[in-house]
Amino acid sequence: MMIILAFALLGYLSGSVPFGVVFTRLAGLGDVRQIGSGNIGATNVLRTGSKKIAALTLLADMLKGTAPVLIGFFAGGELAAIAAALGAFLGHIFPVWLGFKGGKGVSTFLGVLFGLHWPIALAFIAVWLIVAGVFRYSSLAGLCALLAASLCAIYLGPPATAAAIAIMGAIVILRHRENIARLLQGTERPISFGSGKN
């Protein structure tokens, strides 16, 4: 139990690093929490006009989920990896450094998937790209992708891993309540892939 808790803490500390805030400030783009939706994730960082910083945020938010999960697998097995995954995911959503007010968890969820079961992560990416390309809504793409990942986990992943993925997916849906309402009202802000600074 102590080993499991240790990996959960490792995951939390990794996941709680607010890369969106750090990178936008270092790039002189201000506080991303004062821009667009106020979210610290890559989609809102893109609204600063810098595609490079948005891409860097996406990569970092993914890696902070993948790294502790892989460490957990190699050092403690499946349960340690799952504990690290849940810790990293919750760390991104409730980071201690930002008063427990973080992102919505999609990027770190994807990073965790790569660590837990990479084929499920590839399915997530495929669905996200298709939905985002057709409808231009990051929130809709993320919701469809995580539903697809949860279904894939039922058939591809071990039961404990599938359960952890389902729990994280449910939390992401809850974090997107306002986005879902805006999608239904037709007022959700679309994403743009063709403008902004390099």
Image: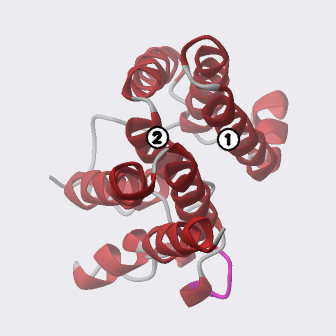
- Work out whether residue 18 can be spotted: yes
Residue type for callout 1: Ala
Tags 1 and 2 touching, CB below 8 Å: no
Residue linked to disc 1: 164
Q: Residue at x 35, y 80 (%)?
A: 22
Residue 153 at x, y percent in the picture: 60, 21
Q: Residue at x 48, y 59 (%)?
A: 41
- Work out whether residue 47 can be spotted: no
Q: Nearer the viewer, mark 1 or mark 2?
A: 1
Residue 145 at x, y percent in the picture: 57, 25
Mostly what secondary structure, the magenta segment? loop
What is the C-alpha distance between the residues marked 1 and 2? 13 Å
Magenta-tinted stretch: 98-102
Q: Residue at x 58, y 33 (%)?
A: 142
Q: Residues within 10 Å of mark 1 (few under 14, many from 20)?
A: some
User: Is 124 drawn above or below residue 60 in the view shown?
Assistant: above
Q: How many marks?
A: 2
Q: Secondary structure at mark 2?
A: helix
Q: Residues within 10 Å of mark 2 (few under 14, many from 20)?
A: many
Of 76 and 141, the residue lying toward us:
76
Q: Quadrant of residue 21?
A: bottom left
Residue linked to disc 2: 110
Q: What quarter of the picture does the N terminus occupy?
A: bottom right
Q: Residue at x 81, y 47 (%)?
A: 174
Of 134 and 160, the residue lying toward us:
160
